Image: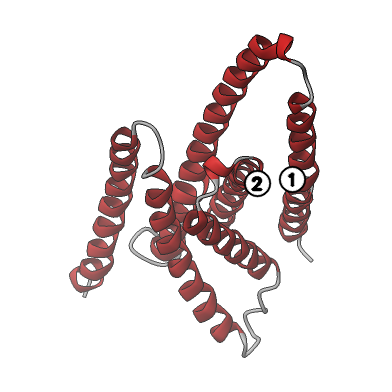
Amino acid sequence: MSSHRLLILCLILCVQNCSCNEGSLVTAVRRSDDLRGSENAETTNLRSWNGQIALHRRRYLGNTHGVLNIIGWGTLLPIGAIVARSFRKSPLKCDEWYNLHVVCQTLGYIIGAVGWSIGMWLGNSSKQYSLRAHRILGIIIFTSSTAQMFALCLQPKKENERRRWWKICHKILGYLLISMIVANIFQGIGHKDHAEKWKWIYVGILSVLSFCALVLEIFRFVMPRIHR
């Protein structure tokens, strides 16, 4: 096994280990809430102050969750897909395209998985953040992106007959994954404060990515005909 595949496997295991620790964090928060319930009336003001701090912390974590997922899953993963399609042969052939693809996918996966873990923690620790559709789609995205990362590590060799089918499945799952990510990001944005601001920021990011992909596709179609 090559070194970069071993590194990816280690990173995946680390991310999943962090996700497994989520349950203990939620239990600790709930125990803390139970202890607060047993306090007497003299500590009402203190509880109110602590509640404001907790609310501020949750908003901060909610924003962190959104930013990490927009950067990781919503930006770096599509960039990795563009690199794989447009830098492998034409229109911009690059000998290091595979390394660039792996770097974008690995960073995007890690950053997005950290953001997903924060979102799951928020959903488990507070009914306010239990957005069912957003949560289910997030779990599907995390599972699919983890499968894609394992696929990078376990891909057949070029001379293997299964390589062709592996590439087809990897590409189809990749495009479906990006579509689900975009839909889920907008789903999450709809429940945030200042939703319009968040929406237009991500629309701007998608516009830049779409424009770059479109220009590269045009060059991909035109360049071979120019050089005939």
N-terminal-most mark, 2 or 1: 1
Any part of residue 95 in sight: no
Q: Residue at x 68, y 66 (%)?
A: 150
- Going by the numbered disc 2, the residue's amino acid type is Asn
Q: Which residue corresponds to the image point at 65% horizontal and 46% vertical from the top-left?
A: 124
Q: Quadrant of the N terminus?
A: bottom right
Question: Which residue position holds label 2?
Answer: 124
Helix or strand or loop: what does disc 1 sit on?
helix
In x, y percent, where is residue 170?
54, 73
* Mark 2 touches mark 1? (CB < 8 Å): yes
Q: How many marks?
A: 2
Q: Residue 48: name its quadrant.
A: top right
Q: Residues within 10 Å of mark 2 (few under 14, many from 20)?
A: some
> Within the image, what quadrant is residue 181 found in?
bottom left
Instruction: Tell me: 50 left or right of 204.
Output: right
Taking the view exactly as shown, the residue that stands out farthest to the bottom is: 161
Q: Residue 158 at x, y = what percent?
A: 62, 80
Q: Which mark is residue 30?
A: none
Amino acid type at circle 1 is Glu
**Residue 59 on image: x %, y %:** 52, 29
Quadrant of the image containing the C terminus: bottom left
Outermost residue, front side: 41
Residue matched to label 1: 22
Residue 98 or residue 34, whichever sits in front:
34
- Asked where in the image residue 152 lies, by quadrant, the reply is bottom right
Q: Element at badge 2? A: helix
Q: What whole-number distance in Å separates the C-alpha atoms at marks 2 and 1? A: 9 Å
Count neighbours of disc 1 (C-alpha within 10 A) and say few if under 14, some if 14 to 19, many if 20 or more.
some
Task: Name above or below for residue 226 compared with residue 32.
Answer: below
Q: Nearer the viewer, mark 2 or mark 1?
A: 2
Whether residue 1 is visible to the viewer of this picture, yes or no, is yes
